[in-house]
Amino acid sequence: MAMTPPPPAAASAAAAKAGAHSVFVYGSLMADEVVRAILKRVPPAAPALLPNYHRFNIKGRIYPAILPVESKKVAGMVIMGVTDEELQVLDAFEDVEYTRTRVEISLADSSEKMLADTYVWSDAEDSNLYGEWDFEEWKKLHMKDFLTMTNGFMHGLEQPEAKTRVETYQTFMQQQEHPTSETQVEG
């Protein structure tokens, strides 16, 4: 006797009980390569919109921040089927700069609304936030270096004395800006 698959609502309820999460991403995590480096897989994803938020540039950083801003919206992706363990890895990656927050998003293709977790900039009064961050520009100018930093962070996360993602990022960027400073001889 063949079993029929559960209806979609039952399947999504079962997935939620099993620890499957939906996560709205709006920056570097829109790149499959970055997601693969962090989660060791690329879960299903769909284009989505987050209303009443704005995606900012951050002075001195190559990744964005979002904060609530009335009448604005952020285009991003919703990654679905994220496990509890993967959510903990994402929490470590986003570090203390961001606060995981439950938000209502709408799928870009169908306008269907759903709840998802996202990472909101922790300092709502940060004077280093400006303008609007651009994913396509980031891909062209920064993705390669960001992916190298991310791979280093993930390797370090497996070590007993793991650095935070912020520490990894700062060290990596200092090495990019001053690549020969360690090899210079004082004269």
Image (cartoon, rainbow, N blue to C red):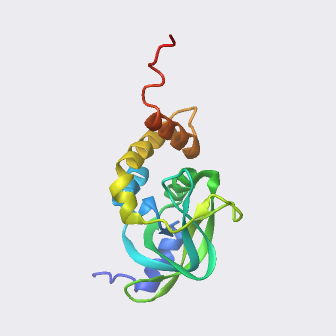
Whether residue 30 is situated above or below residue 62 in the rendered picture: below
Location of the N terminus by quadrant is bottom left
In this rendering, the count of numbered labels is 0
Left or right placement of residue 181 versus residue 46 in this view: right
Name the residue at 44% across, 78% down: 48
Toward the left, the furthest residue is 1
Q: Is residue 136 above or below residue 8?
A: above
Q: Residue at x 44, y 43 (%)?
A: 149
Residue at the front extreme, as displayed: 187
Q: Position of residue 40 (x, y in %)?
A: 38, 51
Which residue appears at 44% of the width and 72% of the height?
A: 76
Q: Quadrant of residue 68?
A: bottom right
Vertical order, 178 against 10 (above or below): above
Q: Position of residue 181 (x, y in %)?
A: 48, 25
In this view, the residue farthest toward the bottom is 111
Horizontally, residue 80 falls left or right of residue 139, namely right
Residue 82 coordinates in the image, percent (x, y): 47, 64
Q: Does any portion of residue 91 appear in the rendered image?
A: yes
Instruction: Using the image as rendered, state which of residue 156 and residue 8 is in the foreground.
Output: 156
Which residue, as the protein is rendered here, is positioned at the far top? Answer: 187
Q: Nearer the viewer, residue 110 or 4?
A: 110
Residue 158 in sight from this viewpoint = no
- Where does the image place residue 80, in percent across and percent down from the top left? 43, 70
